[in-house]
Image: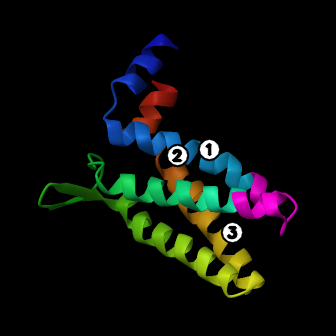
């Protein structure tokens, strides 16, 4: 365990920020999707969740890709997982916009899509060999 903690503590600050937002967003998002909807607690935690997802997506932009095909754009080194950034930003905006309009079904679709795409699919891909999450969890 000490070696993994050392790896995490010496990770770039954007990686640490990303993990500090994506991990609670994963738990909170599941709780929101499975829990009672519409109350003051749901609305407050939903805002927190969308904020965490926004920070998660924006922190990803500055994290360089080292696995798979990459595209260098100035100081940025983007990979395939970076394709989830605009999808996540769109999901956050859609979830916010639909609930503000009173479109609860649209909000539900946006939140489920955001969770599945940005957290489950992108999260699963982050465990592929050669990636930081794989090294952190499996050595």
Marks 2/1 in contact by CB < 8 Å: the verdict is yes
Give the extent of the magenta segment: 31-44
Question: Mark 3 and mark 2: span between their CA atoms?
Answer: 18 Å
Rendered location of residue 42, percent (x, y): 78, 61
Rendered location of residue 85, percent (x, y): 41, 64
3 or 2: tag closer to the N-terminus: 2
Please give the label number shown on residue 21. Answer: 2
Rendered location of residue 117, percent (x, y): 57, 65
Question: Mark 1 and mark 3: span between their CA atoms?
Answer: 17 Å
Question: Mark 2 and mark 1: span between their CA atoms?
Answer: 6 Å
Rendered location of residue 54, percent (x, y): 48, 60
Which residue is at 46% across, 53% downward? 56
Q: Which residue is mark 1?
A: 24
Q: Residue furthest front?
A: 40
Find residue 105 and report its image quarter.
Answer: bottom right
Image height of 61 relative to 64, above or below: below
Label 1 crowd bin: few (<14), some (14–19), many (20+), radius 10 Å: some
């Amino acid at each position: 365990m000490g070696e993994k903690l050392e790896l995490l503590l010496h990770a770039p600050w954007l990686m640490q920020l990303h993990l500090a937002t994506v991990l609670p967003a994963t738990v909170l998002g599941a709780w929101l999707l499975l829990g009672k909807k519409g109350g003051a607690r749901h609305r407050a935690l939903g805002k927190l969740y969308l904020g965490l997802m926004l920070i998660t997506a924006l922190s990803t932009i500055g994290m360089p890709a080292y696995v798979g095909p990459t595209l260098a754009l100035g100081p940025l080194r983007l990979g395939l997982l970076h394709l989830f950034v605009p999808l996540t930003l769109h999901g956050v905006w859609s979830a916010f916009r639909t609930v503000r309009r009173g479109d609860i079904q649209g909000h539900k679709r946006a939140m489920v899509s955001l969770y599945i795409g940005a957290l489950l699919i992108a999260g699963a891909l982050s465990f592929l060999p050669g990636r930081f999450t794989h090294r952190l969890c499996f050595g």
